[in-house]
Image: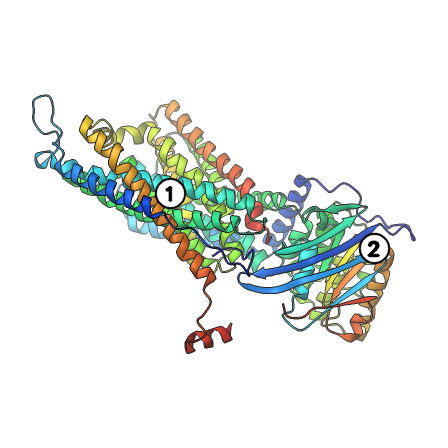
């Protein structure tokens, strides 16, 4: 795993311009504009159904916008929805890891897909930072929901992506887990930027800026 | 029906021009009269070539255009599916129109395919005494019918409008492979080709006279092509209305429906 | 920070294949489903046959009917698995669609090869079939098995996104694979006869191979549209 030199945070920016999305006749997102740059953390808040998760999925390149645009600009180049994915770490409640594989196998598989070979030390560090040391060889099916969420966080920050997108970063986490999540978001400032979708005040206060969504 | 590219401006589909509607009706009427009154085909000895005094074969005037329209429908369905996939990210109604036309063509194609199958077996019964003999043409029309039906079943089973349009379009394009194999490769396999050659040759080389050709290609085929375009246009307008449907506020049940979302 | 070069499609495909193989070796869901299905249908076919001698074309067609339904009983699993357990978003984030398709196709080829290796000899023994040209039969089963796996893979990917899936396999998959099954049954019947001319078998094999290649090519082109949510 190639650790970036401290202070060499890459030039990255996420720009939302009049962004909107409809599912069939139903509009879940409309007229959203925002901009986040290197070293910054943005929290997206809003009532259930206001499109927080949709917004994150659009930024991740998993959904196309119906109106407007969501650009991810890495090193001065806007990246198209498929090319941007390898610059993004993404964790969401509905994006599960493989329950039939162990925690270590999940991380190894995802790193391999991004062309990174994980050493034993990398794995220890990745599991250690989310407090899963000693459980790496267990199948994810045997994890508690909080442990699964910790593993998702470890997977999201695995290759130190310049863009970190966390949907409900603190869901199912205990007090110690919340500290872990907060630490990862803080550390992300050195690697790039983070966007959090959350309604928890104790999580949105990790951010520099808050983007409030209303029903479209 | 498809991805809500612009929920505020639901799509409209243009109708089939009234002048063309009249032209299709006139061609069809002239074609039917000409087909019924056409002199039966006779061989060199002056004997009718076909059964029932030569009239038994006249169902081909309906059968051949129906079969052509089924194939045309598949072509339109495939081309429009490809154009939909290419344009689906563009805003506006263009992508919607491509998908709607593809779906409408496949649906109308199923109808013409069923009609072609029925008229084909009537011809087979009139001339050879059996409704069905699994000759290469009958087999290929069955596969095409199943492809149309599979498409509609798949479309009906996917709820997300964008996934429905994308996956259905992908299905039409993948199914081009079996459709082409049914039409070009399979009938040429030595065993299969010789097994049913008799039935096939009777139709292909069945000597349609000049008058028959004129009625078939001059009247019936253009009339059926017009009918096909008309039906596809109608189906697209229905699809547009379904997508635009806004419940009438004066209707209590519709209002309750709207409140439920 | 990821470096400039993403891993190749082949490297990603092999990673997906390895992951699915590990999972399959652990749970054996697909292979159990396919084998149970094949053995059951073999038993039904054998029971129905009784002591009656059936002609080669029927013997050949029955073999492919068994293999077709066995393929659809198990090969869609590679997609259902991702869709039902909610892992497809993470997979989308990490691998190119072509790599995912290729990895899943490789696993399904392996699965179908395993099934064909079990079912074909069992079928020949149970049905008391004499094989005129064993080598040709092996070639036919291998080539048509490739097309069958390719077709079942792409249709499985489409059906994974639909509701009422189990009732759709036949309706959606059968018309796509019917020409292949007809060619395969035809070629198998030729291979059962000792006297069939080699040129006929080669002609049929070419058609079967072309079908498989065409299905893979078409799937490769449209797969991104099936798999991506955008």
Q: Chain for mark 1?
A: B
Residue under circle 1?
A: B73
Q: Nearer the viewer, residue B186 or A123?
A: B186
Q: Is residue A50 above or below residue C172?
A: below
Residue lying farthest top? B44
Q: Chain for mark 2?
A: A
Q: Are circles 2 and 1 on residues that touch, CB within 8 Å?
A: no
Identify the residue at horizontal 72%, vertical 49% (top origin): A84
Q: Residue C64 bears which disc, if any?
A: none
Q: Residue A192 bears which disc, if any?
A: 2
- Marks 2 and 1 sit apart, C-alpha to C-alpha, by 53 Å
User: In the displayed structure, does residue B125 sit left or right of residue B147?
Assistant: left
Q: Is residue B194 above or below residue A185?
A: above
Q: Nearer the viewer, residue B187 or C30?
A: B187
Residue lying farthest front? B19
User: Could you say where residue A47 lies in the image, as x and y percent from the top left?
Assistant: 67, 73
User: In the displayed structure, does residue A191 sit left or right of residue A46?
Assistant: right
Label 2 or label 1, whichever lies nearer to me, is: 1
Quarter occupied by residue A164:
bottom right
| Mark 2 element type | loop
Q: Can residue A125 be seen in this snapshot? A: yes
């Amino acid at each position: 795993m190639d650790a970036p030199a401290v202070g060499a945070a890459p030039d990255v920016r996420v720009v939302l311009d009049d962004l909107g999305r409809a599912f069939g006749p139903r509009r879940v997102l409309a007229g959203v504009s925002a901009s986040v740059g290197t070293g910054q953390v943005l929290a997206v808040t809003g009532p259930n159904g206001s499109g927080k998760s949709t917004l994150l999925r659009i930024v991740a390149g998993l959904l196309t916008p119906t109106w407007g645009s969501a650009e991810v600009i890495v090193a001065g180049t806007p990246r198209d929805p498929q090319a941007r994915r390898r610059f993004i770490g993404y964790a969401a409640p509905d994006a599960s890891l493989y329950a039939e594989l162990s925690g270590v196998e999940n991380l190894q598989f995802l790193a391999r897909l991004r062309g990174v070979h994980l050493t034993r030390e990398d794995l220890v560090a990745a599991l250690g930072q989310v407090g899963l040391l000693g459980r790496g060889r267990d199948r994810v099916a045997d994890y508690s929901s909080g442990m699964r969420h910790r593993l998702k966080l470890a997977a999201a920050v695995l290759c130190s992506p310049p863009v970190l997108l966390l949907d409900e970063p603190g869901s199912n986490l205990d007090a110690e887990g919340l500290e872990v999540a907060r630490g990862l978001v803080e550390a992300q400032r050195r690697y790039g930027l983070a966007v959090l979708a959350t309604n928890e005040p104790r999580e949105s206060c990790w951010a520099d800026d808050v983007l409030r969504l209303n029903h479209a | 029906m498809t991805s809500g590219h612009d929920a505020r401006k639901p799509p409209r589909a243009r109708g089939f021009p009234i002048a063309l509607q009249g032209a299709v009706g006139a061609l069809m009427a002239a074609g039917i009269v000409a087909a019924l009154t056409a002199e039966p085909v006779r061989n060199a000895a002056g004997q009718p070539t076909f059964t029932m005094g030569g009239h038994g074969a006249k169902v081909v005037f309906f059968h051949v255009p129906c079969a052509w329209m089924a194939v045309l429908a598949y072509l339109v369905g495939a081309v429009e599916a490809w154009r939909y996939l290419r344009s689906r990210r563009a805003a506006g109604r263009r992508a919607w129109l491509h998908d709607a036309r593809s779906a409408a063509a496949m649906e109308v194609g199923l109808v013409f395919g069923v009609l072609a199958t029925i008229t084909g077996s009537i011809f087979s019964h009139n001339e050879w005494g059996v409704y069905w003999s699994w000759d290469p043409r009958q087999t290929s029309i069955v596969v095409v019918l199943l492809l149309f039906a599979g498409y509609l079943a798949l479309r009906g089973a996917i709820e997300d409008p964008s996934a429905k349009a994308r996956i259905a379009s992908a299905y039409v394009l993948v199914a081009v492979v079996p459709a082409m194999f049914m039409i070009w490769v399979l009938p040429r396999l030595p065993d299969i080709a010789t097994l049913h050659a008799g039935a096939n040759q009777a139709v292909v080389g069945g000597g349609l006279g000049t008058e028959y050709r004129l009625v078939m290609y001059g009247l019936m085929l253009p009339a059926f092509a017009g009918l096909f375009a008309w039906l596809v246009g109608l189906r697209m307008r229905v699809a547009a209305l379904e997508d635009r449907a806004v419940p009438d506020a004066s209707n209590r049940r519709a209002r309750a429906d709207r409140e439920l979302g | 920070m990821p470096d400039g070069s993403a891993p190749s499609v082949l490297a990603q495909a092999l990673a997906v294949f390895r992951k699915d193989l590990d999972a399959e070796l652990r749970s054996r869901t697909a292979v159990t489903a396919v084998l149970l299905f094949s053995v059951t249908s073999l038993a039904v076919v054998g029971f129905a046959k009784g002591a009656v001698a059936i002609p080669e074309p029927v013997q050949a067609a029955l073999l492919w009917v068994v293999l077709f339904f066995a393929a659809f009983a198990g090969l869609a699993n590679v997609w259902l698995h991702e869709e039902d357990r909610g892992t497809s978003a993470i997979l989308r984030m990490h691998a190119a669609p072509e790599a995912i398709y290729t990895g899943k196709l490789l696993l399904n080829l392996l699965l179908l090869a395993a099934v064909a290796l079990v079912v074909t000899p069992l079928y020949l023994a149970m049905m008391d079939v004499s094989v005129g040209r064993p080598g040709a039969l092996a070639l036919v089963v291998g080539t048509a098995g490739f097309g069958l796996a390719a077709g079942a893979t792409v249709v499985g990917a489409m059906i994974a996104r639909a509701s009422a899936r189990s009732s759709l396999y036949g309706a959606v998959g059968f018309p796509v694979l019917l020409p292949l099954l007809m060619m395969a049954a035809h070629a198998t019947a030729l291979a059962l006869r000792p006297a069939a001319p080699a040129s006929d078998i080669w002609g049929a094999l070419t058609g079967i191979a072309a079908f498989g290649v065409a299905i893979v090519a078409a799937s490769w082109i449209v797969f991104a549209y099936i798999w991506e949510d955008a």
